[in-house]
Image (spheres, rainbow, N blue to C red):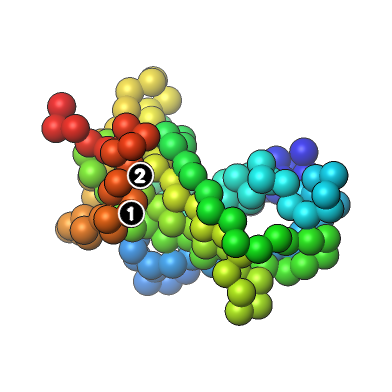
């Protein structure tokens, strides 16, 4: 519940945009592990990682200054698919950061990587395929979202591992 409140605060009182930040730049969110993040084994619960990633993606949009543009169009983000790889545990009170960046996009989704780090140690990596929807229910093509935020960008080549994952979970553009 605490991370849900954290997300609400991040959304309704976003941090200031980062001057000159581009869609392909990395956004960093710093956090500390709280008691409500822990499972019975006293390390961060796998579900808490996903909630933390929600907060970090919201901060990424705030860093871009995207909220006004998205609200004006009636667009909002949703997760189409995600996967996690865990390397180390996070424990109560530890400080860590989540580096969020867009890897690429196709007609359907925007692919993001979110890396958790504690000091110099890699903790976990999440991949997210995100879509944007209109308040009326229509799907918004990912290139249209990117163009609204930063016109003139071309999608970088998607890393092979992410391309394989996107195909395996059936979120990749199929040429429909």
State how many labels appear: 2
At 38% across and 21% down in the image, what residue appears? 137
Q: Which residue is mark 2?
A: 165
174 to 115, vertically: above or below? above
Which residue: 44% across, 46% down? 128
The residue where tag 1 is placed is 161
Q: Is residue 142 above or below residue 30?
A: above
Left of 135 or right of it: where is 140? left
| Label 1 Cα crowd, 10 Å radius (few <14 / some 14-19 / many 20+) | few
The N terminus is located in which quarter?
Answer: top right
Give the image quarter of residue 113: bottom left
Q: Nearer the viewer, residue 24 or 123?
A: 123
Q: Residues within 10 Å of mark 2 (few under 14, many from 20)?
A: some
Work out which residue is located at the far top of the displayed protein and give it.
Answer: 136
Whole-percent x and y of residue 167?
A: 29, 39
Distance, label 1 to label 2, CA atoms, is 6 Å
Disc 1 on helix, strand or loop? helix
Q: Secondary structure at mark 2?
A: helix
Where in the figure is residue 170, as x and y percent of width and height? 32, 32
Please give the name of the residue rendered at 85% of the width and 44% of the height, measured from the top-left corner.
40
Q: Position of residue 79 (x, y in %)?
A: 46, 37
What is the residue that sits farthest to the bottom in this orientation?
120
> Is the Cβ of the residue at disc 1 closer than 8 Å to that at disc 2?
yes
Q: Is residue 21 visible?
A: yes
Residue drawn at (77%, 67%), measured in percent from left and top?
94
Horizontally, residue 76 falls left or right of residue 167, namely right
Front residue of 144 and 97: 97
Q: Which mark is residue 90?
A: none
> Does residue 91 appear left or right of residue 98 in this picture?
right
């Amino acid at each position: 519940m605490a991370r849900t409140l954290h997300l609400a605060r991040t959304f309704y009182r976003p941090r200031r945009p980062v001057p000159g930040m581009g869609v392909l730049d990395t956004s960093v969110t710093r956090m500390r592990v709280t008691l409500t993040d822990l499972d019975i084994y006293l390390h961060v619960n796998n579900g808490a990682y996903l909630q933390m990633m929600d907060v970090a993606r919201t901060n990424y949009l705030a860093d871009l200054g995207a909220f006004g543009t998205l609200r004006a169009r009636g667009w909002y983000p949703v997760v189409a698919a995600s996967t996690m790889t865990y390397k180390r545990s996070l424990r109560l009170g530890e400080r860590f950061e989540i580096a969020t960046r867009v890897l690429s996009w196709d007609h359907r989704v925007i692919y993001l990587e979110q890396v958790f780090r504690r000091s110099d140690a890699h903790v976990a990596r999440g991949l997210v395929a995100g879509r944007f929807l209109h308040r009326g229910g229509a799907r918004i093509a990912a290139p249209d979202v990117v163009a609204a935020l930063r016109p003139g960008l071309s999608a970088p080549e998607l890393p092979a591992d992410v391309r394989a994952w996107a195909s395996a979970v059936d979120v990749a553009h199929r040429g429909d």
